[in-house]
Image: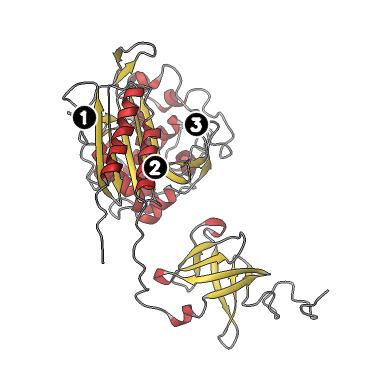
Amino acid sequence: MTSSFEELLPGTRRALSHRIATAQAEGRAPSCVAAVQREGRTVWTGARTCVDGHAPDGDTQYRIGSITKTLTAVLVLRLRDEGLLDLGDPLEKHLPGTGVGEVTVAQLLSHTAGLPAETPAPWWERTPGSLRPELADVLGERARMHPVGRTHHYSNPGYTLLGRLVEAVRGRSWAEALRSEVLEPLGMRRTGPQAEAPYAGGWAVHPWADVMLPEPAVDLGLMAPAGQLWSTADDLCRFAAFLAVGDGRVLGADSVREMRTPAAPAGPGEGAGGYGLGLQIVRAGERTLVGHSGSLPGFVAGLWVGVEDGLAAVVLTNATSGLSAPAVAADLIRIVAEAEPRIPQPWRPLPEVDQELLGLTGPWFWGTAAYALSLTADRGLELQPLRGTGRGARFAARPDGTWTGLDGYYLGETLRVVRREDGSVSHLDLGSFVFTREPYEPGDMVPGGVDEGGWRGL
């Protein structure tokens, strides 16, 4: 017996509508548009506006500010996956003459390159990029503010460097590479560096009076890879679905998972979480969200993906401040997750089983600590402590008969089965740690040996 849970319940839909209505009213925003996605499908959209009979919809463009950075990061990861660069490469190897060539690609992606947060004056978000025609104009005289690789310090100029890196390796503009390699494959046809009608105008709302002032919408020039893009709620939902599971036409699931993995701790004042490779990672109550916030004068945007809940939310607004789009987007995910928890997939047996692997399952001991080894799909293994705390991990099979750790303490470490001369299993070797079938099982497999007297009482 199966049931369809594709549509949200009426009470959930009303709660979502109430949340954005409250946000627009209390945040005094000219307009906002929002969407919620569940299991890759948009299940709710909503909008509020101060203009009667003229609400925006999922096709209305807003500026998305620093969400642009995540798309730039996708371009860089594509270069890595194609073997055109390594994340550990110094910038100088591919983009010489910047003056900060010792910083690595990974450090730029994770904001640990020690670069300044902003460009030299004037304020780059409200002035045309023609005022900063060269990288030296973007970086300024003090290009290093912190020790390289030791501090998470959010840097807009760092993503300008990544945009130029893409151009240097690809041999074409950042915008052209983004359109053909990411936007078109994902169906994000309403996303681009310039506004295309219908789009929202950007506004500043007076802090002490209900009056507005239009904000300039300038071309950011070299700073475009850090925050230039316009997009829609519909397009950002498509991008959210990609961030959850990947897309072989753009980036595979493993590379997207790598983007979502913390590469740097949160900076001062940024709260719990951290930063991956072009993705913010935040803790919202009991759940972890990945995505990015964005702002430019006249606009605030938020996109979050709750991978474990199978949910994503987008909120876009056209006010410089007042309505916190990222906070509202996190609330939309919470509302759905609490009202309609994710329905797990039915349990199903594996399509086939390797009897030799099956023989490895069950209890193993690291010293006296008890662990259980389980068999997963695609010849994978999972090792978890049986009681108390311990270093559990999942492992993926490799062609050479070993397994590679996928998470936790053993991420990237090798698990191998060590056999005796007669072919029987002696022990498991995990990054030099020995796991035996019995605690401190006698024999030469335990480093340091086992006392000949064996176990004893007091």
Question: Residue at label 3?
Answer: 99
Name which of mark 2 and mark 3 comes first in the sequence.
3
The answer to whether any part of residue 177 appears in the image is no
Question: Residue at label 1?
Answer: 56
Percent coordinates x, y for residue 169 in the rendering: 36, 43
Q: Which mark is residue 30?
A: none
Mark 1 residue crowding within 10 angstroms, few (<14) / some (14–19) / many (20+): many
Quarter-of-image position of residue 136: top left
Q: Which residue is nearer to you in this view: 89 or 293? A: 293
Helix, strand or loop under label 3:
loop
Q: CA distance from mark 3 to mark 1?
A: 45 Å
Percent coordinates x, y for residue 310 in the rendering: 35, 51
Q: CA distance from mark 2 to mark 3?
A: 45 Å
In the displayed structure, does residue 53 sit left or right of residue 373?
Answer: left
What residue lies at 24% left-to-right and 21% top-to-bottom? 50
Mark 2 residue crowding within 10 angstroms, few (<14) / some (14–19) / many (20+): many
Q: Is residue 175 above or below residue 55?
A: below
In the picture, the quarter occupied by the N terminus is bottom left
In the displayed structure, does residue 93 sit left or right of residue 323?
Answer: right
Give the amino acid type for the residue marked by disc 1 in the picture. Pro
Question: Residue at label 2?
Answer: 334
Q: Nearer the viewer, mark 3 or mark 1?
A: 1
Q: Is residue 250 above or below residue 330?
A: below
Name which of mark 3 and mark 1 comes first in the sequence.
1
Give the amino acid type for the residue marked by disc 3 in the picture. Gly
The answer to the question of whether label 2 and label 3 lie on touching residues, with beta carbons closer than 8 A, is no
Give the amino acid type for the residue marked by disc 2 in the picture. Arg
Q: Which residue is nearer to you in this view: 17 or 177? A: 17
Mark 3 residue crowding within 10 angstroms, few (<14) / some (14–19) / many (20+): some
